[in-house]
Image (tube, rainbow, N blue to C red):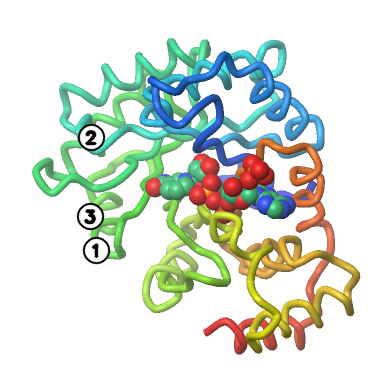
């Protein structure tokens, strides 16, 4: 597995992690026992994708419980990231939400605690100061944000006095390149890791019609380098210095395929051809 530095830290995280939206069910109501989900997570961890991203919101907290099972005897070898929901971003709620996540995850700390979405009714500085206290208390190693604009990320950074915002988790794939206008250049300049969510465009990369030029381009590149579309799409993302990606899969064959999105380099001309085709 390839690794990249997290933000400005010396901590290395895998370039591909395990997304977990839908793992163990979509809502608390539909929450499954999760044995297959636990097995799929362990399979992904054993492949080397030792970075799990989750959120208190997923399946009403059940996803965190499923992850706890997969982490038994492995906790310290995994970089574990979770997120606090926008309705819990006040100084009073952040510590409570964190304690609840730690309880469900059955761990004493999370590696990365992310504000899931900004909440316009709660000042970003208030949230960040509460998160900084969690770092001081040893419950959180690093602070990140998610779905924050450049301005919101800057505001978050300015509110912190002893640590940095190390990451911003945002949608990024060949099919959604909106962060390239502002956020990506800002993150590169500020050494903030971009954690690309929905990197396979929620499964659409595998399904694009060959009647369209862009899909013909990706298929030509795939045939040339001997990889699949999904592997090309992931490699294209992680070619960028500050980007790591968290594809989600509960299917062992897909997990193995996704792992093959790293460990090699797209030739420059193919990277450029893809960038032109998927504008
Ligand atoms: P994604 O990873 O782009 O795509 C997931 C979908 O693609 C699933 O249906 C999966 O089905 C399928 N898939 C995965 N690998 C495949 C392969 N090799 N071949 C064919 N199909 C494949 O989308 P996502 O789940 O939206 O995003 C990934 C993660 O990002 C989430 O799980 C979550 O952790 C995070 N996320 C964060 C936010 C946020 O606001 N911060 C928002 C959305 C997502 P199978 O399980 O059947 O393989």
Of the image marks 2 and 3, the number of the one nearer the N terminus: 2
Q: Secondary structure at mark 2?
A: helix
Taking the spot 30% from the left edge, 21% from the top edge, the residue there is 97
Q: Is residue 121 left or right of residue 134?
A: left
Q: Are marks 3 and 1 in contact (CB under 8 Å)?
A: yes
Marks 2 and 1 sit apart, C-alpha to C-alpha, by 17 Å
Q: In this picture, is 180 found above or below 80? A: below
Taking the spot 84% from the left edge, 63% from the top edge, the residue there is 264
Q: Secondary structure at mark 1?
A: helix
Of the image marks 2 and 1, the number of the one nearer the N terminus: 2
Q: Mark 3 highlights which residue?
A: 155
Marks 2 and 3 sit apart, C-alpha to C-alpha, by 12 Å
Select label 2 or label 1 by which is in front.
Answer: 1
Q: Are marks 2 and 1 in contact (CB under 8 Å)?
A: no
User: Is disc 3 surrounded by few (<14), some (14 to 19) or many (20+) residues within 10 Å?
Assistant: some
Is disc 2's CB within 8 Å of ligand 1? no
Q: Secondary structure at mark 3?
A: helix
Along the line of sight, which residue is nearer the eye, 148 or 133? 148
Along the line of sight, which residue is nearer the eye, 36 or 118? 36
Q: Mark 2 highlights which residue?
A: 129
Q: Which mark is residue 151?
A: 1
Q: In this picture, is 126 found above or below 167? A: above
Q: In this picture, is 59 found above or below 203? A: above
User: Is disc 1 surrounded by few (<14), some (14 to 19) or many (20+) residues within 10 Å?
Assistant: few
Q: Quadrant of residue 103?
A: top left
Along the line of sight, which residue is nearer the eye, 255 or 165? 255
Marks 3 and 1 sit apart, C-alpha to C-alpha, by 6 Å
């Amino acid at each position: 597995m390839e690794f990249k530095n997290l933000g400005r830290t010396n901590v290395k995280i895998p370039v591909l992690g395990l997304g977990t939206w839908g793992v163990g069910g979509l809502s608390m109501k539909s929450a499954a026992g999760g044995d297959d989900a636990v097995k799929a997570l362990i399979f992904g961890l054993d492949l080397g994708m030792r970075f799990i991203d989750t959120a208190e919101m997923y399946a009403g907290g059940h996803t965190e419980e499923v992850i706890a099972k997969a982490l038994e005897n492995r906790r310290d070898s995994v970089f574990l990231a979770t997120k606090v929901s926008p309705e819990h971003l006040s100084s009073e709620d952040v510590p409570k939400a964190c304690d609840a996540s730690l309880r469900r995850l059955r761990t004493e700390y999370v590696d990365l605690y992310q504000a899931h979405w900004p909440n316009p009714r709660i000042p970003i500085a208030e949230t960040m100061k509460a998160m900084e206290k969690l770092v001081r208390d040893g419950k959180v190693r690093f602070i990140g944000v998610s779905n924050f604009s450049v301005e919101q990320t800057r505001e978050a950074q300015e509110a912190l006095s002893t640590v940095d915002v190390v990451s911003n988790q945002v949608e990024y794939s060949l099919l959604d390149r909106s962060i390239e206008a502002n956020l990506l250049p800002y993150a590169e300049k500020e050494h903030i890791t971009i954690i690309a969510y929905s990197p396979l465009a929620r499964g659409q990369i595998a399904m694009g019609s060959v009647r369209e030029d862009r899909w013909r381009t990706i298929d030509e590149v795939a045939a040339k380098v001997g990889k699949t579309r999904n592997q090309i799409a992931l490699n294209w993302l992680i070619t960028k210095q500050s980007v790591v990606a968290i594809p989600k899969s509960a299917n062992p064959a897909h997990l193995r395929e996704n792992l093959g999105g790293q460990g090699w380099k797209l030739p420059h001309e193919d990277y450029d051809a893809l960038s032109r085709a998927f504008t």
